[in-house]
Image (cartoon, grey):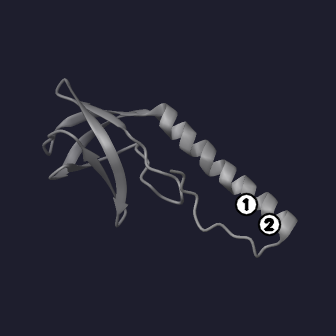
Amino acid sequence: MLEFEAEVIGVEGDYVILNRTAFYPESGGQDNDTGYLIANGRKIDVLDVLEEGGVIIHKINGKLNVGDKVRGFIDRDRRFRHMRHHSATHLLLHVLQNKLGKHVWQAGARKE
């Protein structure tokens, strides 16, 4: 899902919480999604997405209020690039463990 509709249920500075989201937070070695929200005819960029205590939090570059209706759009190219990298890392680890032994392990998968 790369598009969705939601409602703002929490606001704290540059961060918002939506009642539902398709934005993926940084987790399991895969970077977070970015994209944008459309609210009241305005485009608001989603710069970062994190999870705190099971709640997905979106860092934005605009102003939203509790109760605002939004339509979210995920940056498709970024999402699929991260998914491919994440999957390739798992495949590489599997091959390395089969060839070199189970002592080979993954300490992370960050790419800068």
Where 27 falls versus 46 (above or below)?
A: below
* Disc 1 from disc 2: Cα separation: 6 Å
Amino acid type assigned to the residue bearing label 2 in the image: Gln
Residue 51 falls left or right of residue 45: right
The residue drawn where x is 50% and y is 50% is 112
Q: Position of residue 47 (x, y in %)?
A: 32, 43
Please give the residue where the numbered disc 1 appears in the rendered image: 93
The residue drawn where x is 73% and y is 60% is 93
Please give the residue where the numbered disc 2 appears in the rendered image: 97
Q: Quadrant of residue 52?
A: bottom left
The residue drawn where x is 23% and y is 49% is 16
Q: Position of residue 88 (x, y in %)?
A: 68, 49
Q: Position of residue 65 (x, y in %)?
A: 13, 43
Q: Residues within 10 Å of mark 2 (few under 14, many from 20)?
A: few
The residue drawn where x is 53% and y is 60% is 28
Answer yes or no: is residue 40 visible: yes
Label 2 residue SS: helix
Amino acid type assigned to the residue bearing label 1 in the image: Leu
Label 1 residue SS: helix
